[in-house]
Amino acid sequence: MSRTAYRTCPLCEALCGLELTVEGHRVTRVRGDAKDPFSKGFICPKGATLGVLDGDPDRLQEPLVRSGDEHAKADWEHSFAVVQRRLREIITAHGANAVAIYLGNPSAHTIAGPLYGAAVVKAIGTRNLYTASTSDQMPKHVSSGRMFGDPMAVPVPDLDRTDHLLMLGANPLESNGSLCSAPDFPGRLKAIRRRGGTITVVDPRRTRTAALADRHVFIRPGADAYLLLALVHTLFAEDLVRLRHLAPAGPAASAGPSAPSPAVNGLDDLRALAVGFSPETVAETTGIQAAEIRRMARELAAADRAAVYGRLGTCTQEFGTLASWLVDVLNVLTGNLDREGGAMFPRAAHVPVYRKKRPFTSGRWQSRVRGLPEMNGELPAATLADEILTPGVGQVRALITIGGNPVLSTANGARLDEALAGLDFMVSVDPYLNETTRHADVILPPPRPAQTGHFDLALTGFAVRNYVRYSPPAIPPPDGRPTESDILARLATIASGQDADPALLDEFIIGSTLAKATAAEGSPVQGRDPAELRDLLRGDSGAERRLDMMLRLGPYGDGFGAEPDGLTLTGLRDDHPHGLDLGALTPRLGEVLCTASGRVELCPPPFAADVERLRAGLRTGPATEAEPYVLIGRRHLRSNNSWLHNVPELVGGSNRCTLQLNHDDAARLGVGAGDLVRVISRTGAVEAVAEPTESLMAGVVSLPHGWGHDRPGTRMRTADGHAGQNVNAITDEREIDPLSGNSVFNGVPVRLEPLGHQIPV
Ligand SMILES: Nc1nc2c(c(=O)[nH]1)N[C@H]1C(S)=C(S)[C@@H](COP(=O)(O)OP(=O)(O)OC[C@H]3O[C@@H](n4cnc5c(=O)[nH]c(N)nc54)[C@H](O)[C@@H]3O)O[C@H]1N2
Ligand SMILES: Nc1nc2c(c(=O)[nH]1)N[C@H]1C(S)=C(S)[C@@H](COP(=O)(O)OP(=O)(O)OC[C@H]3O[C@@H](n4cnc5c(=O)[nH]c(N)nc54)[C@H](O)[C@@H]3O)O[C@H]1N2
Ligand code: SF4
Ligand SMILES: [Mo]
C-alpha cells in the first residue's frame, strides 16, 4: 500500500514543493508537487533523490557517544545526561563563554533551528556564537542593517516582472538562487528574455547562468565594488540618476506602515565618493573595459524596470560589504528599490509588521583573540579556531554544532579540524558522523526528513512571491524519538541549568510573545488577554503552537479572530496542503525601514570610510606574469555544500572535485586534463585533478567546496569513495571583509605546481 504526502524540499533555498510516495516507512518516489502554487511541479536532481537521502543507511538513527576514538550507539537519556554533566562542569569551571556554538546552513532550513537555536544560545549565555552566515551572506545583513536599519531587510530582485536583471556573483542555474527564493529560477530567467527583457551576468567564470544571459562580463575576482562604484559614478556623471518615488519630498518621513514614501539620505556624499572611480580608473582592476561599464550603466538606467542582484560571489570576497551595499545603491539610484520589477522586500506570513524595531548596531562585543566585532549577535567563523587554540581566560573549551560541517565549510577548516581535536567537550546535532562530528563526544541525530515537518521560517522572507506552506511529518517518527525541535529544546533546558520540562520553554516564549503583542500599538490583538489567546492556539506540539501564534499575529493572520478569513496553522495545513500563494511582492519600504533617520541611508559613514581601502587597491598597470593565480569557488547542481556526497545518484559524472583552470594558463603550465596539480596558498596545499576550460578567466582557478571526505573516523561510505579535496584547507582564516567579518573564498592568491603524472580518467 502506498500513499502520497507533500512537503517543501529542505535542501536549498528554492522552496520547491515535493510529492512523496510513501510505502510503509520508506519514501519510494519523489516528484515535483504540480499543485504547489509557487513551484508548480519544478524539481531538481537533489530534490528528486530526497527519498534516497532519507533512507541513507549511514544516516544516524540513534545518538552516538564517543569513548576513545570510537563512537558507540547510546540511548537518548544517557546521551543527554552526558551532555548535561559535561556542559555544566565546563561552564562552572570556565564560564559561559568557554562554550561556543556553531549553527550551520541546514539550521536555516528546519523548523527547529529558527525556533530553538536562539534559545540554546541564550541558555548557555555565550558570546561565542558562530554560524555559516559569516561564510556566506553576512555582508548583505550589514549592508541592509546600515541602509535600511534592519539586517534582515534584504531586497530581492522581482524576477517575474523585471525588464532588466544585472546579476553579479550568482549562478542560479546550479544553485537555484540564494537570498532570492524562486523555484525554477532558470525558468524565471528564461521568461525575462521571452518577454523582451535582458540579463547581464558578471562572473569570472562563464557559468551556465552566464551562457543563458544576453551578456556575460568577466570580472577579476573581488573587484565588484570597483565596477559597481564606477556604475554609480557613470549614473551621476551622465545625469542618469532617477530616484522616482524615492526622491526627497520634504522632512524625513517617520518609519511605520503608514509612512509616506521615505526619502534617501546621503546622495551628495555618495556622488562625491564616486568621483574618483570613473570607468577608466577601474578598468585594469576589474578587467572590464570602460566602454563596457558605461554601457552597463546606461542599460540599467534605460530599463523601465530593472534589478541589480548580487550574491555569493559578491559577498565572500575582500570587499563583500561594499559590493553588497553598492548593489542596493544602484537599485535606489535607478528608482527601482521597492518598486514592481525592481528590488523588493518580501512579506513573510510569520513575521509581524507591527513590532517596533531598533536600528541595527554592531560591535557590541569583540572576539577575544583578534578583537573582531560582533555582527548580528555573532562572531566570524574564521576566528573560531583562534578562540579554541589560544590559551587564556575565556578560551573556548567546548563546542555545540547544530547542522554544520565547519571543518569543510569554513576558512582554513583544516586548522579548525586540528583545533576540534583538542576540545574538552563537543556535542553535535547532526544526522551524520562526518568530518566535523567525528570530533564530537555526543552526536544527537535529528529524525529523517520524511519524519520531520516543514515550515520555512528563514527563506520565505527572501522569496520572489509572498508564499506560505506548512507540511506535517510525512511519516510519524517512532514513539519516543525526539524531533529536532525536542532535541534543541532539551539542550536549551540542560544548558540553563534547570532540568525542567522542555515544553515549558515553548510556554514561556508563547507567554512573553503574547504579552508583548497585546501591549503593542497597532498589533491585531492590542488590548486582549494573553491567557485567552494562549487557549486559542492549536497544534500537536509546542513548535506547532508557536507557528500557529506567529501566523495569527502575522500580516496575513486571523489576528486571533480579528480577521476570520486570515491564516492559522491548522487552516493552512488542512486547507492548503500544497502551500498558499499570497501574491506578488508589493511596495513596503515604509513598513521595513527602521534607520534612526527614518530614511534610506545611501552613504553610511563606515562604508564611505572603507572606500579608502578600495582606493588603495586600485591597480595602476596591467597584470604581470609574476602575479599569483587567484582561486574562486564553484557549485554543482547535484551537490549541496558538504553533505550530499553520500547519495550515490548524485556523485560522479561532472559532479567532481576538479581544479578548473583557463586553457591558455594550462597550456603555459604544461598541464593537461587529468593531470595532478598542487595548489598552494599561505595556509596549505591540496592536490587536485586539472580540468582546463575556456569558461574561466585567465589567471583564475576554481575548486568546489564541501569535498575532502578522506578523514578517518567518519561514517559516510559513498562519500568516502568520492573524497575530493577540502578547498578550505587552502582558504585563509586571516582574510576577512573587515566590515562584516565574512570570509574571503573568492580571490584567494595561490601558486600552482604541476605534478605531471596523468590520472586515468
Ligand atoms: N546545487 C547546489 N545548490 C546550492 C548549494 C550547493 O552547494 N549546491 N548551496 C546553497 C547555498 S548554501 C548557497 S549560499 C547558494 C549560493 O548560490 P549562488 O549565490 O548562486 O552561489 P554560487 O553558485 O556559488 O555562485 C557564485 C558565483 O560567483 C562567481 N564568483 C566568484 N568570485 C566572484 C567575484 O569576485 N565576483 C563575481 N561577480 N562573481 C564571482 C562564481 O564563479 C560563481 O559562478 O546556493 C545554494 N544552493
Ligand atoms: N570555500 C568555500 N567555502 C564555503 C562556501 C564556498 O562557496 N566556498 N560556501 C559557504 C556557504 S554559502 C555556506 S552556507 C556554508 C555551509 O556551511 P555548513 O553549514 O557548516 O556546512 P554544510 O556542508 O551545509 O553542513 C551541513 C551539516 O548539517 C547536517 N545536516 C543535514 N541536515 C540536517 C538537519 O536536518 N538537521 C541538522 N541538525 N543537521 C543537518 C549535515 O550532516 C552536515 O553536517 O559553507 C560555506 N563554505
Ligand atoms: S531546487 Fe532546491 S528546493 Fe528545489 S528540488 Fe532542488 S534542492 Fe530542492
Ligand atoms: Mo550558503
Image (cartoon, rainbow, N blue to C red):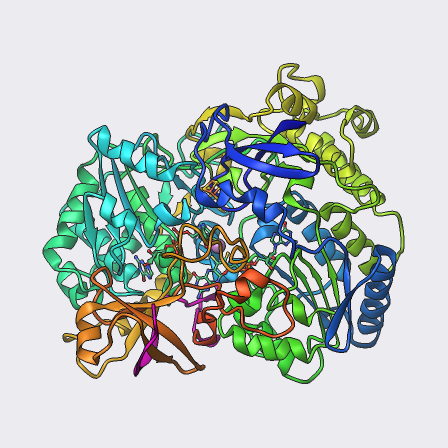
Q: In the image, residue 573 lies at what x, y percent? A: 65, 25
Q: In the image, residue 752 lies at what x, y percent? A: 30, 80
Query: Does any portion of residue 115 appear in the rendered image?
Result: yes
Q: In the image, residue 176 lies at what x, y percent? A: 41, 44
Q: Residue at x 41, y 83 (%)?
A: 682
Instruction: Say which of 249 and 760 sits in front.
Output: 760
Q: Residue at x 28, y 64 (%)?
A: 223
Instruction: Say which of 605 and 648 sits in front.
Output: 648
Q: Residue at x 68, y 52 (%)?
A: 117
Asked if 635 appears above or below 39 in the picture, the reply is below
Seen from this angle, which residue lies furthest top?
564
The number of callouts visible is 0
Horizontal arrangement in the rendering, residue 163 relative to residue 175 (left or right):
left
- Image-quadrant location for residue 495: bottom right
Horizontal arrangement in the rendering, residue 69 relative to residue 479 (left or right):
left
Query: Does any portion of residue 328 appear in the rendered image?
Result: no
Q: Residue at x 51, y 49 (%)?
A: 151
- Image-quadrant location for residue 692: bottom left
Instruction: Say which of 556 and 89 sits in front.
Output: 89
Q: Quadrant of the C terminus?
A: bottom left
Asked if 419 appears above or below 608 in the picture, the reply is below
As for residue 599 lying within the magenta part, the answer is no
Horizontal arrangement in the rendering, residue 44 relative to residue 758 (left or right):
right
Instruction: Say which of 147 and 306 sits in front.
Output: 306
Q: Quadrant of the N terminus?
A: top right
Q: In the image, residue 450 lies at what x, y percent? A: 65, 40
Tell me the magenta residue range.
732-761
